[in-house]
Image: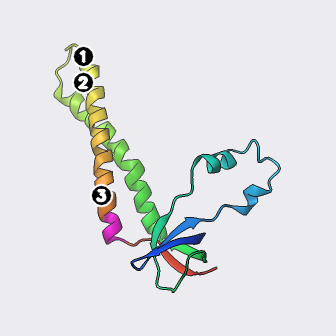
Amino acid sequence: MIEELAVVVKIENHQVWVEAESNSACGGCQQKSSCTANTLGHVLKKKSVPVDSFIQLKTGDKVIVAIDEGLLLQASLLLYLLPLMALFTGAGIADWMLLADKPFNELWIAGSALVSFILSLWFINKAQYLLLLTSNRPVVVRKA
């Protein structure tokens, strides 16, 4: 299990909404002005995430949230490998179907690759919702 410190920001319908705690090492660093992690932290706003909890909590509690490594690996394969495979498969199918020495063959191949890439992203978006409903989700393990 991968664990992260978070703060409870909202409780509703047996779900706890948490925000990740900012890393304390970034606050006192001497290279804060030139650090990309610090810049990304200011650009990307904190986002609340719903997690399951079997512990009685209240707003403001610091908790440890955990997620299974296998779930994280599956999600990364889905997000990175599937679009790449779709891109090359779409280009390969278009190249196989087109006749040689025709004008604009490369344009059709590139267009087919782009369409298959966009379709894979649409599929991932739809599958993401279904996977969140049926698979393991992040869980509050304990109070910090």
Q: Which mark is residue 72?
A: none
* Location of mark 2 (residue): 108
What kind of element bears circle 1?
loop
Q: Residue furthest right?
A: 30
Determine the residue positioned at 48% across, 65% down: 49
Locate residue 51, reporting x and y percent.
46, 72
Mark 2: amino acid: Trp
Mark 3 or mark 2, earlier in chain: 2
Stretch in magenta: 131-135
Task: Please name which of the two marks, 3 or 2, marks the residue nearer to the observer.
Answer: 3
Locate residue 25, reporting x and y percent.
75, 60
Circle 3 Cα neighbour tier, 10 Å, few/some/many (<14 / 14–19 / ≥20)? few
Q: Is residue 53 visible?
A: yes
What kind of element bears circle 2?
helix
Q: Number of labelled discs?
A: 3
Q: Nearer the viewer, residue 24 or 68?
A: 24
Q: Are marks 3 and 1 in contact (CB under 8 Å)?
A: no
* Location of mark 1 (residue): 104
Q: Is residue 36 left or right of residue 117?
A: right
Which colour style is shown? Answer: rainbow
In the rendered image, which quarter contains the C terminus? bottom right
Q: Nearer the viewer, residue 25 or 55?
A: 55
Locate residue 38, reporting x and y percent.
69, 49
Determine the residue positioned at 73% across, 56% down: 26
Circle 2 Cα neighbour tier, 10 Å, few/some/many (<14 / 14–19 / ≥20)? some
* Location of mark 3 (residue): 127
Q: Is residue 133 magenta?
A: yes
